[in-house]
Amino acid sequence: MEAEAYLSGSTIIISEDRYAVVKAHQISSPFFAAISDHQEVTLIQKEVDLNPENTIESETGWRIITFDVFLPFQLTGFLALVTTKLAEVGISVFALSSYSTDHILVKEIQLSLAMDKLREAGVNIEE
């Protein structure tokens, strides 16, 4: 399966809200995503939902880009392709995968540049 074929012609949805990546004491709602591993709890939350009492550290100013395409488990290299294209112009991402698709968080100050680079790759942007 070709990652390029899934990327070109796909559509992305860009969150209107700004998000924070939070190192938290515990999982607490509301959140976009929660990860609890043997070292820490990480929450992706809207900035307006941050709870200072539950926050150990946070990084704010992120926007979520969702790839509105079903990505089969057998597909390899999709996120590698996306992150490589964005890295070419100095954009760092925070990547997440759900059951059916991928999401990346990009700093809002780099969102316009990220959109331009993804358009070059044949991606449609839902606005």
Image (cartoon, grey):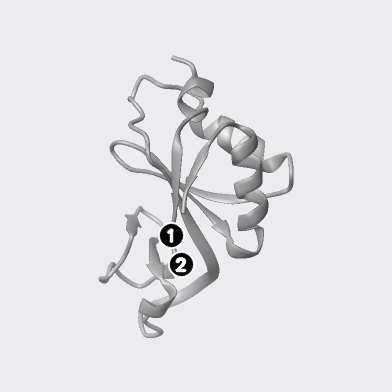
Residue 26: horizontal and vertical position, in percent? 30, 70
The residue lying furthest to the front in this view is: 127
**Vertically, is 29 above or below 52?**
above
- 118 vs 86, nearest the viewer: 118
Residue at 37% from the left image edge and 34% from the top image edge: 69
Residue 62: horizontal and vertical position, in percent? 53, 63
Circle 2: residue type: Tyr
Q: Which residue is mark 1?
A: 15
Q: Which mark is residue 19?
A: 2
**Circle 1 sits in a helix, a strand or a loop, which is it?**
loop
Residue at 32% from the left image edge and 42% from the top image edge: 98
Q: Residues within 10 Å of mark 1 (few under 14, many from 20)?
A: some
Distance between the alpha carbons at the discs numbered 1 and 2: 9 Å
Q: Is residue 19 left or right of residue 112?
A: left
Q: Residues within 10 Å of mark 2 (few under 14, many from 20)?
A: many
- 16 vs 87, nearest the viewer: 16
Q: Is residue 112 left or right of residue 65?
A: right
- 97 vs 108, nearest the viewer: 108
Callouts 1 and 2 close, C-beta under 8 Å? yes
Residue at 74% from the left image edge and 44% from the top image edge: 89
